[in-house]
Image (spheres, grey):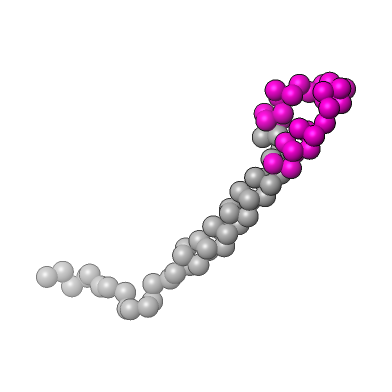
């Protein structure tokens, strides 16, 4: 039997990596929700413009989805 092998005491292992997991997950969820809201707000506002207004700012109606995804 190898006498150099020792096991850590129960509860002595650090849980630091797990402690930071929940805040990171929550932060990523908030980022995703915020991105989704920005996309939909931008797309809704652009869709509400007339063709004349879109043309005035150099956007075609077919480009709205792609432009909204960039924001």
Front residue of 25 and 5: 25
Q: Please determine whether, in this image, residue 36 is positioned above or below residue 59.
A: below
Pinpoint residue 2: horizontal percent, then vertical percent.
Answer: 16, 69
Residue 24 vs residue 4: left or right? right
Tell me if residue 51 can be seen. yes
Q: Please determine whether, in this image, residue 5 is positioned above or below residue 29.
A: below
Residue in the picture at 32% in, 78% down: 9
Residue 52 vs residue 16: left or right? right
Callout count: 0
Pinpoint residue 51: horizontal percent, then vertical percent.
Answer: 82, 23
Query: Which secondary structure class fits the magenta region best?
Result: helix
Magenta stretch encompasses residue 5: no
Q: Please determine whether, in this image, residue 8 is positioned above or below residue 31.
A: below
What is the quadrant of residue 7 in the picture? bottom left
Q: Please determine whether, in this image, residue 16 is positioned above or below residue 69.
A: below
Magenta stretch encompasses residue 41: yes
Front residue of 69 and 51: 51
Residue most extreme to the left: 1
Residue in the picture at 67% in, 35% down: 69
Residue in the picture at 67% in, 29% down: 66
Front residue of 18 and 51: 51
Front residue of 3 and 64: 64
Start-end of magenta stretch = 40-67
Tell me if residue 57 can be seen. no
What is the quadrant of residue 42 in the picture? top right
Residue 50 vs residue 15: left or right? right
Quadrant containing the C terminus in the rendered view: top right
Pinpoint residue 23: horizontal percent, then vertical percent.
Answer: 57, 62
Residue most extreme to the bottom: 10
Pinpoint residue 46: horizontal percent, then vertical percent.
Answer: 78, 33
């Amino acid at each position: 039997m190898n006498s150099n092998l020792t096991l850590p005491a129960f509860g002595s292992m650090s849980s630091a990596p797990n402690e930071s997991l929940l805040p990171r997950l929550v932060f990523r969820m908030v980022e995703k929700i915020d991105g989704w809201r920005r996309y939909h707000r931008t797309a809704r506002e652009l869709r509400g413009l007339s063709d004349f207004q879109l043309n005035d700012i150099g956007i075609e109606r077919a480009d709205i989805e792609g432009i909204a995804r960039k924001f």
